[in-house]
Image (spheres, rainbow, N blue to C red):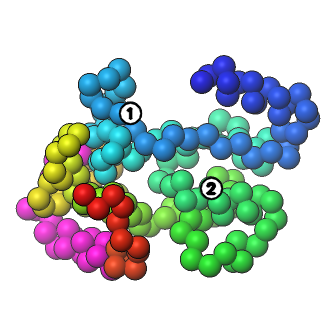
Amino acid sequence: MDDAVGRVLQTVSDLGEEENTLIVFLSDNGGPTWETSSSNGPLRGFKGTTHEGGIRVPFCMKWKGQIPEGLVYRNPVIQLDIVPTVMAAAGAPVSAVEDLDGVDLLPYLTGEVPGRPHQTLYWRYGKQWAIRDGDDKLVVSAPGPGRAPAKRPHLYDLSKDLGESRDLMTTRPVRAASLKALWDSWSAKQARPFPSR
């Protein structure tokens, strides 16, 4: 993969198109399972779960002269941001697309717009689900392949517990209830979950 990515980057450079090309690289999920050679440590979970090890992935962007070189952006973004970012880069009006979930990341990456691109992010995968609001995450996830998701949500503060090891449900029940209400409202507006297992 490293060689193939290198060839793509080199070809764009050889064509003299680095300043006209926005390159995006990411994965669609975390490593497959704890049984293979992949490791999502220190994150909990893996591909097919809504824990951080299943949904937090490398996300790299390059656009010479537009995105600062060497920038490490620490605020949460999501794959849904690719379409509005590419549209903005191409000069297409983002407002022309109704109900677009993502945002144009370019002003955030250049520092033109401060703060987080998203206050709240949502996930839904079968009976598993999660919501992240700020640094708080409420999640129902499966412990392993073929296993049923947890029967109740767990609450984590990702700013202090990236590995999702300290459940805060008993100490912050009001916050958990408000996150569940936000998720329920969002989910009610979505199509039926797939897979529905």
Q: Residue at x 71, y 57 (%)?
A: 86
Residue 168 in sight in this render: no
Q: Does the magenta stretch include residue 170?
A: yes
> From what the image shows, is residue 4 above or below residue 21?
above
Q: Which mark, by number, is residue 31?
A: 1
Specify start and end residues of the magenta stretch as a single range: 164-185
**Amino acid beneath label 1:** Gly
> From what the image shows, is residue 115 above or below residue 164?
below
Q: Which residue lies furthest to the left in this view?
A: 170
The front one of 3 and 59 is 3
Report x, y in % for residue 45. 28, 40
**Amino acid beneath label 2:** Ile
- Element under label 1? loop
Around disc 2, counting alpha carbons within 10 Å, would you say few (fewer than 14), some (14 to 19), or many (20 or more)?
some
- Element under label 2? helix
Query: Which residue is tagged 2?
Result: 82
Around disc 1, counting alpha carbons within 10 Å, would you say few (fewer than 14), some (14 to 19), or many (20 or more)?
many
Q: Which residue is drawn at 41% across and 67% down?
A: 120
Gap between marks 1 and 2, in whole Å? Answer: 21 Å
The front one of 177 and 45 is 45
60 with respect to 35 (left or right): right
Report x, y in % for residue 164. 23, 46
Quadrant for the N terminus in the image = top right
Residue 138 in sight in this render: yes
In primary-sequence order, the first of circles 1 and 2 is: 1
Q: Residue at x 67, y 28 (%)?
A: 5
